[in-house]
């Protein structure tokens, strides 16, 4: 289901560049996401939108973006735009609407660099425009010797296990489809990588799981693998914590107690778990010669 909405702003400026994704701005052509990942914290009540899996297309986005980019240039505020920080920029409906494609055309015209976050194979359609952005985008001075060009492309995964993905990411393309799409872009000279977010406790966080993720990433042309743990928010019916515990109850009832102990009513796992996860991830990445950051 798709609804069209009008918005007042489309380009949001971060106070400072975020170190992980390198974004100065965020931009979401759509609100809500039909990929319906059960762990998605942008659905449900966290941001007050209750967008759930209903996709809202920001139909006046192109007009508003032109104005905002012109203003940014006038203020000499260039920087990397994160496309898809809150909802995938390539939901299936994009195939007909071409909204993200039009937005990319504007970004190219104004020569802004971008970092696209997606799970979709539809991004392959826009290789021509992305090639153009790669040629013309003006990087911020402080990143000009750390990036080869102004297009970064990250494909997100919580697991490379096809069966598990089908349950927890029911509307998303399969992991292998995402990997093959990434490979095509990598072979075409783009900076591509994997975002292993969220890593699922007891399901995709073992050394073996991480090894499988890192080896697979490398095989399919990733230049980096970023990672983060799971956060579980809210008790409303559409909140990810509720959906995630329902998933555990239906599929892994033996893990319920482990999760309750790990999260103890908090939205995140304890610092000690996160530290161990980070050590494990860095160690495996070093072993396989893949970086955990984007810059050269
Ligand atoms: S693809 Fe991303 S935005 Fe869409 S539901 Fe999954 S995690 Fe959320």
Image (cartoon, rainbow, N blue to C red):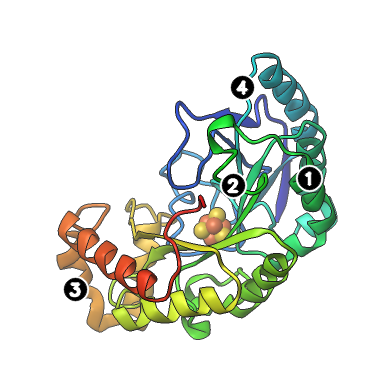
Q: Residues within 10 Å of mark 3 (few under 14, many from 20)?
A: few
Quadrant that contains the N terminus: bottom right
Q: Which residue is at the front of the view, 111 or 178?
A: 111
Image-quadrant location for residue 63 = top right
- x and y, in percent, of residue 169 in the image: 53, 70
Q: Circle 2 — which element?
A: loop
State the separation of the CA atoms marked 3 and 2: 42 Å
Comparing labels 3 and 2, the label whose residue is closer to the camera: 2
Q: Which residue is at the front of the view, 26 or 216?
A: 216
On residue 147, the disc is: 2
Disc 2, disc 4: CB below 8 Å? no
User: Which residue is label 3 attached to?
Assistant: 258
| Left or right for 162, reference 286 | right
- x and y, in percent, of residue 31 in the image: 61, 45
Q: Is residue 253 above or below residue 151?
A: below
Q: Earlier in the sequence, mark 2 or mark 4?
A: 4
State the separation of the CA atoms marked 4 and 3: 47 Å
Q: Is residue 83 above or below residue 71?
A: below
Disc 4, disc 3: CB below 8 Å? no
- Residue drawn at (29%, 78%), measured in percent from left and top? 206
User: Which residue is label 4 attached to?
Assistant: 77
Comparing labels 4 and 3, the label whose residue is closer to the camera: 4
- Residue drawn at (56%, 79%), measured in percent from left and top? 219
| Left or right for 112, reference 197 | right
Image-quadrant location for residue 181 = bottom right
Q: Circle 3 — which element?
A: helix
- Residue drawn at (40%, 58%), measured in percent from left and top? 240
State the separation of the CA atoms marked 2 and 1: 13 Å
Q: Circle 4 — which element?
A: loop
On residue 135, the disc is: 1
């Amino acid at each position: 289901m798709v609804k069209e909405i009008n918005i007042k702003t489309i380009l949001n400026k971060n106070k400072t560049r975020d170190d992980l994704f390198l974004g100065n701005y965020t931009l979401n052509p759509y609100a809500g996401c039909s990929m319906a990942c059960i762990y998605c914290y942008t659905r449900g009540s966290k941001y007050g939108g209750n967008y759930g899996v209903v996709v809202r297309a920001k139909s006046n986005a192109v007009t508003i973006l032109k104005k905002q980019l012109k203003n940014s240039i006038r203020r000499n505020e260039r920087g990397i735009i994160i496309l898809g920080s809150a909802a995938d920029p390539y939901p299936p409906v994009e195939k007909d609407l071409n909204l993200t494609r039009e937005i990319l055309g504007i970004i190219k015209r104004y020569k802004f660099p971008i970092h696209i976050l997606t799970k979709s194979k539809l991004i392959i359609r826009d290789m021509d425009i992305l090639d153009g952005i790669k040629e013309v985008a003006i990087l911020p001075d402080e990143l000009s010797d750390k990036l080869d060009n102004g297009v970064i492309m990250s494909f997100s995964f919580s697991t490379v296990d096809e069966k598990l993905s089908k349950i927890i990411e029911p509307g998303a393309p399969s992991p292998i489809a995402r990997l093959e799409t990434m490979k095509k872009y990598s072979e075409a000279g783009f900076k591509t990588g994997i975002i292993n977010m969220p890593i699922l406790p007891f399901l995709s966080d073992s050394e073996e799981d991480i090894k499988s993720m890192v080896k697979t990433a490398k095989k399919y042309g990733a230049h980096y693998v970023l990672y983060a743990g799971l956060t579980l928010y809210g008790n409303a019916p559409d909140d990810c914590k509720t959906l995630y515990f329902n998933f555990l109850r239906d599929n892994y009832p033996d893990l319920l107690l482990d999760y309750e102990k790990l999260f103890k009513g908090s939205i995140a796992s304890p610092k000690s778990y996160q530290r161990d996860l980070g050590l494990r991830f860095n160690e495996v990445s070093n072993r396989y010669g893949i970086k955990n950051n984007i810059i050269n």
